[in-house]
Amino acid sequence: MNAEGLRATCPGAGTALPGTSGGSPAALADRLARAGHLTSAWRDTFTRVDRAWFLPDRVWIRIRGEDSYHPVGRTAEPTRWHALSHDDQAIVTHVEDTQVKANQ
């Protein structure tokens, strides 16, 4: 999936594709610091600890204009999953009573 396709299905994630300016803990730290959400005291720690280490293999996102959550699997959609792990948005790690395709 290209950056435009990712932005269309996952608002805010288009700049977080690996290999671009947003695909790393350091790039996320830069964005958060510029927005005033990350102090210099926390910057080094935030940059050294990859948020992806703490995410399960399946995360859930809301699609703009929809009322439900959609799974994004690390194995099924690795580029999208990785982009989400370095994006400045909430990621849901557990949803109750879900039915998803086996390959997600």
Image: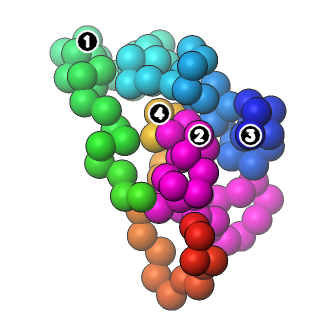
Disc 3 to disc 4, how far (Cα)? 16 Å
Q: Which mark is residue 40?
A: 1
Name the residue tied to disc 2: 79
Which range of residues does the magenta coloring cover? 58-84
Disc 2 to disc 3, how far (Cα)? 8 Å
Amino acid marked by disc 2: Thr
Which residue is located at x 44 percent, y 23 percent?
24
Give the structural element (helix, strand or loop) at label 4: loop
Disc 1 to disc 2, how far (Cα)? 29 Å
Q: Which mark is residue 1?
A: 3
Residue 14: x %, y % from top left: 68, 31
Judged by depth in the image, the label closer to the viewer, 1 or 2, is: 2
Judged by depth in the image, the label closer to the viewer, 4 or 2, is: 2
Image marks 2 and 3: residues in contact by CB distance under 8 Å: yes
Image marks 3 and 1: residues in contact by CB distance under 8 Å: no
Residue 28: x %, y % from top left: 45, 24
Pick whichever of labels 1 and 2 is earlier in the sequence.
Answer: 1
Which residue is located at x 76 percent, y 65 percent?
66
Say left or right for 75 vs 9.
Answer: left
Name the residue tied to disc 4: 86
